[in-house]
Image: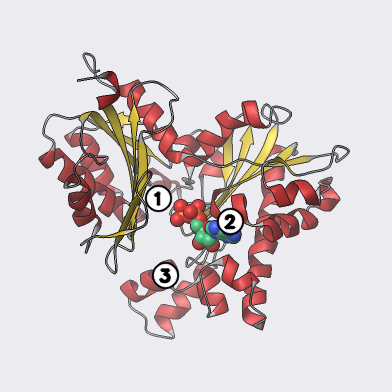
Amino acid sequence: MSETDRRIVVLNTGSSSLKFAAYSLTPEAPPLLSGAVDGIGGTARLQWSGSSGDHPVQAANPHAAMEALAALANGPLSGNIVAFGHRIVHGGPDLNHSVLVDDTTLSRIEAVSPLAPLHNPPALDVLKGLQKRFPGVPHVACFDTAFHRGHPAVADRFAIPDSLYQDGVRRYGFHGLSYQYIAGAMKTQAPEIAGGKVVAAHLGSGASMCALVNGHSVDSSMGFTALDGLPMGTRSGSLDAGVILWLQQQKGWSVDKVEHFLYHDCGLQGMSGLSNDIRVLLASDAPLAKMAVEYFIYHTARTAGALAVSMGGIDGFVFTAGIGEHSIPIRARVLERLRWLGFDLDEAANAKGHGRITTETSRLHAFVIPTDEERVIARETLALLPPGRP
Ligand code: ADP
């Protein structure tokens, strides 16, 4: 078996997509292969690097998508797999760094699954399925909450009794694997600000922002669950808790109905009544589509202000994830609202969308840095391989 046949397979499981990437054991080498099954539960399609077009697959759930991948000859789940690395969205209070999975880890992840109902259960399902299918191959769990566990107490708490804090009701913060990647990538892609006070904005279908001081997270827009903070594709973002009470008491909504509403029927989709995709909303003249876009921009800028206060100042801004990496008008309009702080947009650089997007003479600088959560998981997995492997 040649060295390149020995691989780490990284899985990023969501409720409707299963992203995967296979890496050789050479640190920082590009992935051997990467791809995704999208549309799980509906018309599922598989695509991967090196293969042309989409391939229909039978995948009623993420577990079935994993089985479809495993059946693929010469695919990501073939060759000599020395370990699997998993993105686990919620690690709760105890899982504050990546770990080699054992039964205790599994039960801890299970215990906090209600806090990430869209993410933890399918990821666990895939992990357990792989344990059965590939007996003896170790698994590493990497948590989106872990990067934020060093927050100061004021950023880690809600104004509720301490007993609830001890029960785990805390402001965890999410997208930590993405921010960990950004913190590292800034050293080469934004060295002017890497050691300073930076607001990083992960703006994808899920969206959050993080206050980074010298590459360490000190605050996040997200809290107990991935519902908090910025408005998202279909999630509400911050909402007065009284709204939930009102929906239950005055509208008679059940807990399940409220949960479905908050995760699937709010955010850009709910506000616009049109789409969860910012591209569709930007192209629309419908007043509610325009309002949804304006709300997204307003809250991104407003949160930047709040996180600057968390850090006692601001030296720079980083845009990342689907919207942050690709949407020229959203970046421009967010920075326009932050102009008074000292961000002077370079329109040509913003149109290119790589690296620094502020002018040379701008007092503060903003950057676009593509994130790579799978790379972080591969690094963590390689670092935790048990002795004797590889
Ligand atoms: P996630 O990983 O949270 O599913 P991504 O980071 O892939 O999300 O971001 C997905 C979102 O990015 C899409 O919902 C879409 O709104 C947005 N997006 C993707 N490409 C573009 C683009 N070219 N212009 C604007 N927005 C984009």
- State the residue at coordinates (28%, 22%): 385
**Which sits in the foreground, 269 or 301?**
269
Name the amino acid type tagged 2: Ile
Quadrant of the image occupied by residue 138: top left
For marks 2 and 3, give the one nearer the viewer: 2
Give the CA separation, mark 2 to mark 3.
19 Å
Label 2, on which residue?
Answer: 323
**x and y percentages locating residue 194 in the rendered image:** 67, 29
Name the amino acid type tagged 3: His
Q: Mark 1 or 3 closer to N-term? A: 1
Quadrant of the image containing the C terminus = top left
Determine the secondary structure under disc 3: helix
Label 1, on which residue?
Answer: 164
Quadrant of the image occupied by residue 293: bottom right
Q: Mark 2 or 3 closer to N-term? A: 3
**x and y percentages locating residue 81 in the rendered image:** 22, 30
**x and y percentages locating residue 119 in the rendered image:** 34, 53
The reply to whether the residue tagged 2 has its Cβ within 8 angstroms of ligand 1 is yes
Label 3, on which residue?
Answer: 264
- Residue contact between numbered discs 2 and 1, judged by CB atoms under 8 Å: no
**Which sits in the foreground, 75 or 263?**
75
